[in-house]
Image: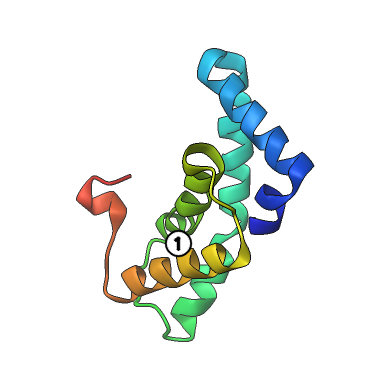
Amino acid sequence: MQRTLADPRQGALFRAVIVAATCDPRAAEALHRFYAVRIAEWPPCVEQAVRRAELPQGTDAVEVIRAVSAPLYYRLLVSGDPVDEATADRAAEAAAAAARVGVDASASGLN
């Protein structure tokens, strides 16, 4: 994800699609479908961590994926700071740390 968002062409494309989705219902629907598919592809990584006992049973894999993604999209769309590997590593570690202690964004109303 980091490499895609940091790529000059891909990052610009994502920004354009996201901007279009704020104004056009069809673009928004397409964007939501795209991300639903993408998010559905990643839970096996989290589930493997649960099987290895690196994360607790019952960890919401989708929420972990969202927690990893949010800081990268914030940089892409809001702050303009680089979407670099160090940022991606910090986001992954923060999401894993939260999951290890049982933080569940869906239960707290943060989603």
For the image shown, how many numbered marks are present on the structure?
A: 1
Note whether 17 is above or below 5 in the view shown: above
Which residue has dot 1 on it? Answer: 61
Image location (x, y in percent) of residue 97: 36, 74
Q: How is the image coloured?
A: rainbow
Residue at 66% in and 27% down: 16
Instruction: Tell me the crowding category of disc 1: few under 14, some 14 to 19, or many 20 or more residues within 10 angstroms, Cα based.
Output: many
Residue at 61% in and 20% down: 20
Image location (x, y in percent) of residue 57: 35, 75
Question: Quadrant where the N terminus lies?
Answer: bottom right
- Residue 96 image-quadrant placement: bottom left
Q: Residue furthest right?
A: 9
Residue at 59% in and 59% down: 42
Q: Residue furthest left?
A: 108
Q: Residue furthest bottom?
A: 52
Residue at 62% in and 33% down: 15
Residues 1 and 15: in front is 15
Residues 77 and 47: in front is 77
- The kind of secondary structure element at disc 1 is helix
Note whether 108 is above or below 92 in the view shown: above
- Residue 67 image-quadrant placement: bottom left
Image location (x, y in percent) of residue 2: 64, 57
| Circle 1: residue type | Ala
Image location (x, y in percent) of residue 44: 57, 67
Question: Quadrant where the C terminus lies?
Answer: top left
Q: For this view, does 63 lie left or right of residue 89?
A: left
